[in-house]
Image (cartoon, rainbow, N blue to C red):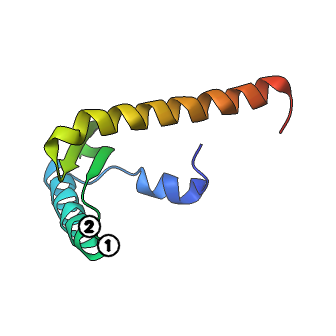
């Protein structure tokens, strides 16, 4: 669960259109590129899920982008998967043990 649920709900509102979503993503990636340079981070793997309105329905867009050495994408993704899996397993173990 997100720590700031109110902010998460606000950010979960779909963009008004696919074009608006694409414009927001473009701006986001431009800002990430500037932050990457500013903080000298060579490789960044971004995975995102977002939504937009399309003909009165909500549509979801999932995406991933590797910034930097493209040959590192798979290993970085595998690392992230393993880290998130371990965190989830540790959280479940705590919940099942009754300790919090």
Residue 11 sits in quarter: bottom left
Q: Position of residue 75 (x, y in %)?
A: 30, 34
Q: Residue at x 16, y 60 (%)?
A: 26
Q: Left or right? Give the position of 95 relative to 80.
A: right
Q: Which image quarter is the C terminus in?
A: top right
Q: Left or right? Give the position of 10 relative to 62.
A: right
Q: Residue at x 17, y 53 (%)?
A: 68
Q: Which residue is mark 1?
A: 39
Q: Which residue is mark 2?
A: 36
Query: Could you tell me how many numbered marks the image carries?
Result: 2
Is residue 96 at least partly visible in the picture? yes
Q: Position of residue 30 (x, y in %)?
A: 18, 67
Which type of secondary structure does the marked residue at label 2 adopt?
A: helix
- Tell me whether circle 2 and circle 1 mark residues in contact (CB < 8 Å): yes
Q: Left or right? Give the position of 60 relative to 82.
A: left
> From this viewpoint, which residue is outermost toward the top?
96
Q: Position of residue 33 (x, y in %)?
A: 20, 66
Tell me the number on the disc at residue 69.
none
Which type of secondary structure does the marked residue at label 1 adopt?
A: helix
40 or 47: nearer the viewer: 40
99 or 68: nearer the viewer: 68
Q: Residue at x 67, y 31 (%)?
A: 90
Q: Residue at x 59, y 35 (%)?
A: 87
Is residue 55 at least partly visible in the picture? no
Spatial CA distance of label 2 from label 1 is 5 Å
């Amino acid at each position: 669960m997100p720590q700031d649920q109110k902010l998460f709900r606000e950010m979960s509102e779909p963009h008004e259109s696919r074009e608006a979503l694409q414009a927001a993503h473009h701006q986001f990636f431009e800002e990430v590129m500037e932050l990457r340079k500013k903080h000298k981070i060579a490789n960044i793997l971004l995975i995102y899920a977002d939504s937009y309105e399309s003909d009165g329905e909500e549509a979801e867009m999932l995406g991933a982008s590797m910034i930097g050495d493209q040959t590192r994408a798979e290993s970085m993704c595998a690392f992230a998967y393993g880290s998130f899996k371990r965190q989830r397993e540790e959280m479940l173990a705590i919940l099942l043990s009754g300790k919090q």
